[in-house]
């Protein structure tokens, strides 16, 4: 089947190297699903998923030197995630999954 011209296209970015696996923090209930999908797209994801208090919105927190990787991750996600540079000595790129983290299809 051919894609319809008016169908939305899912953006897929090439996973970026940041020197360590992506850390997932599940604050909305979709951690296992998102981890599986990211891994299938070539992202290295930590084996364990951290848990946190509920959050409505997803966000990506990253050290300034990993901006390119954080932006590539944001383009890969089918849901919105705000980007912010960490203010302390963070350990790499962190994806905090809020209640809005829905990955269907």
Image (spheres, grey):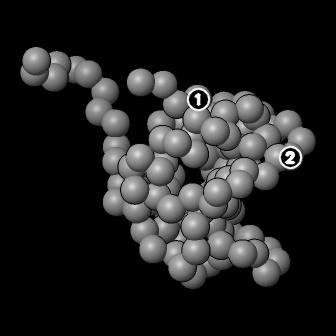
The tally of labels here is 2
The residue at the point 74 percent across, 70 percent down is 86
Q: Secondary structure at mark 2?
A: loop
Residue 3 drawn at (x, y percent): 16, 23
Q: Is residue 4 left or right of residue 9?
A: left
Outermost residue, right direction? 53
Q: Is residue 12 left or right of residue 48?
A: left
On screen, residue 79 above or below 2 = below
Outermost residue, front direction? 47
Task: State the image quarter where residue 99 is shown.
Answer: top right
Disc number placed over residue 52 in the picture, else none: 2
Q: Quadrant of the N terminus?
A: top left
**Res. 51 visible in picture:** yes
The residue at the point 49 percent across, 68 percent down is 69
Disc number placed over residue 71 in the picture, else none: none
The crowd level at tag 2 (other Cα within 10 Å; few <14, some 14-19, many 20+) is some
Disc number placed over residue 102 in the picture, else none: 1
Q: Quadrant of the C terminus?
A: top left
Return the disc, 2 or 1, that comes first in the chain's sequence: 2
């Amino acid at each position: 089947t051919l894609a319809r011209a008016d169908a939305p296209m899912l953006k897929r970015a090439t996973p970026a190297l940041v020197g360590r696996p992506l850390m997932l923090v599940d604050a909305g209930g979709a951690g296992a699903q998102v981890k599986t999908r990211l891994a299938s797209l070539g992202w290295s994801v930590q084996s364990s998923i951290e848990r946190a208090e509920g959050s409505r919105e997803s966000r990506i927190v990253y050290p300034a030197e990993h901006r390119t990787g954080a932006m590539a991750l944001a383009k890969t996600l089918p849901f919105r995630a705000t980007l912010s540079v960490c203010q302390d000595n963070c350990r790499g790129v962190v994806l905090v999954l809020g209640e809005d983290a829905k990955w269907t299809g």
